[in-house]
Image (cartoon, grey):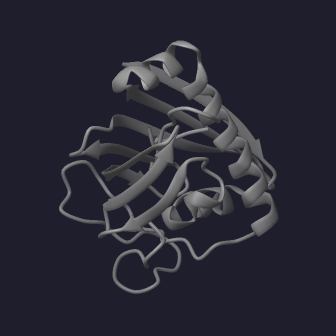
Amino acid sequence: MSTIKETVDVQVPLSTAYGHWTQFEEFPKFMEGVDEVRQIDDVHNHWTTSIGGVRREFDTEIVDQMPDDRITWRTIGGDTQQQGSVRFRQLDATRTRVELVMDVEPTGVAEKGADALGMIERRVKGDLHRFKDHVERSGESGAWRGRIRPGDPGPIAGPGPVPGPGPAPGTGPGPVPGPGPGPGAGPGPGPGMPL
């Protein structure tokens, strides 16, 4: 298993950076190789990725989510194995640090080779920089502001507007991989980042 750590500073307030990361269905706009992320319920997302000519589908589960602080996820089922956490740190009123840590288990010869060559890490780094461009161009989002705790059956509403019961479709990690998942040719990570 490989651990990937990447950080990017974005020129938006903390709540804006966090809010955009909870818009999982928007991930294909900045995550290379991610074709679709579909929210199943408050804590589960279904991913479709195409990386290095290999199409994969897998689900992620958000195991911890604290508004304006962190989102932690893991993959469930399928042959993609990863877990990760993305944290948000306010630098000042208009800048936020986004820190992604992911554990990924490459499967197959191509992914293991890509991991050995540092391609997965480069993919994640590229995805974070594309997230920076995306969030700085987009402004505020209609983010869900609920709380998910380890072992909880569902989210608990937190401060801020909640668009209906639970997150609206397209809201609400995280490889990351993940961190999503990931960046470039070859395998990558997801909510994180997909691998």
Give the percent coordinates (x, y) of residue 128: 66, 42
Residue drawn where x is 62% and y is 30% of the image? 6
Residue 167 sits in quarter: bottom left
Residue 43 sits in quarter: bottom left
Residue 21 in view, yes or no: yes
- Furthest toward the bottom, the residue is 164
Residue 192 in view, yes or no: no
Q: Nearer the viewer, residue 178 or 29?
A: 29
Residue drawn where x is 57% and y is 65% of the image? 26
Q: Which of 79 and 20 is in front in this view?
A: 79
Residue 133 shown left or right of residue 71 in the figure = right
Residue 172 sits in quarter: bottom left
Quadrant of the drawing holding the N terminus: top left
Give the percent coordinates (x, y) of residue 113: 48, 16
Q: How many marks do you count on the picture?
A: 0
Q: Nearer the viewer, residue 93 or 153?
A: 153
Give the percent coordinates (x, y) of residue 36: 48, 62
Q: Work out whether 87 lies above or below 107.
A: below
Residue drawn where x is 43% and y is 77% of the image? 169
Q: Work out whether 137 lies above or below 133.
A: below
Give the percent coordinates (x, y) of residue 88: 60, 45
Q: Which of 146 and 49 is in front in this view?
A: 49
Q: Work out whether 91 lies above or below 116.
A: below
- Furthest toward the front, the residue is 53
Residue drawn where x is 44% and y is 38% of the image? 195
